[in-house]
Image (cartoon, helix red, strand yellow):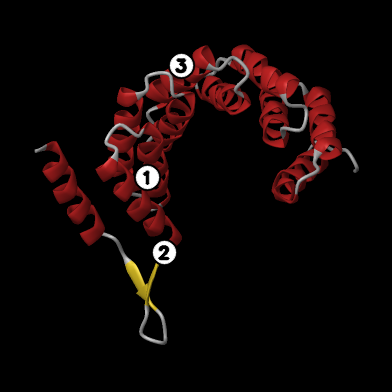
Amino acid sequence: MKKILLTIMCIFILSSISVVFASEGQTVVSPNDQVIIDCTNVIVNNPNDAIAYCKRANAYGRKGQDDLALNDYNKAIGINPKYAYAYVNRGFLYQRKTNIDLAFEDFSKAIELEPYYTFAYNARGVIYTKKDQDDLALNDLNKAIEINPKYTLAYLNLGQVYEKKLLYQDAINTYRKLILNATLPQDKTWVDLAQNHIRELGETL
């Protein structure tokens, strides 16, 4: 009976997938929809695959289908209550929906499960700033950098907290550290922002 229900669910989900039609008349499925299709097939055959639920939730989130994403994150965590990655991603979803209290709970849970989870420390640090708990934000962001000195986004967030506290020289020093530790192509966005912040604070590069 459960297998039948899962099969029906699979058909329902697949029927809602958006497709793009190539010029040759072939049907091309978008990358996110392909992830949803693949994960749904996995779930039909293994309803207790928490990873498949989490991956499908991520794809739903990228498509802006937050309710479906939340359902899948909840399912993944229900299957594996120690799945720190699912807590972090559900936390980002809550944060996007401006439910910072639930986001805070999920990031804290991820840190409890994985004490060296840099993304979780950075994310919770951002939540602390939204709650005007800047000293706690500094603690989390510095912890993220301590764990991963190349974590450029944490430097950027840390610098912004220093600015908020009017500690301008600390902010400048932090932005300079970001620039020095940027090694990946995707770091360019954060480097550009750090350079702009340094200029806004009256310093030269």
Image marks 3 and 2: residues in contact by CB distance under 8 Å: no
- Tag shown at residue 109: 3
Quarter of image, res 16? bottom left
CA distance for labels 3 and 1: 21 Å
Check disc 1 and report the residue beneath it.
56
Q: Is residue 125 above or below residue 33?
A: above
Q: Is residue 131 left or right of residue 193?
A: left
Q: Residue at x 67, y 22 (%)?
A: 144
The tag earlier along the polypeptide, 3 or 2, is 2
Q: Is residue 111 above or below residue 25?
A: above
The tag earlier along the polypeptide, 3 or 1, is 1
Please tell me how crowded label 1 is: few (under 14), some (14-19), or many (20+) other residues with Cα within 10 Å. many
Image marks 3 and 1: residues in contact by CB distance under 8 Å: no
Looking at the image, which is closer to me, 151 or 3? Answer: 3
Q: Which amino acid is tagged 1?
A: Arg
- Dot 1 lies on which element? helix
CA distance for labels 3 and 2: 33 Å
Please tell me how crowded label 3 is: few (under 14), some (14-19), or many (20+) other residues with Cα within 10 Å. many
Quadrant position of the C terminus in the picture = top right
CA distance for labels 2 and 1: 14 Å
- Dot 2 lies on which element? loop
Image marks 2 and 1: residues in contact by CB distance under 8 Å: no
Check disc 2 and report the residue beneath it.
30
The tag earlier along the polypeptide, 2 or 1, is 2
Q: Which amino acid is tagged 2?
A: Ser
**Where residue 104 sits in the image (x, y, percent)?**
45, 20
Q: Is residue 165 visible?
A: no
Q: Residue at x 19, y 55 (%)?
A: 11
Toward the right, the furthest residue is 204
Quarter of image, res 134? top right
Q: Is residue 57 above or below residue 142?
A: below
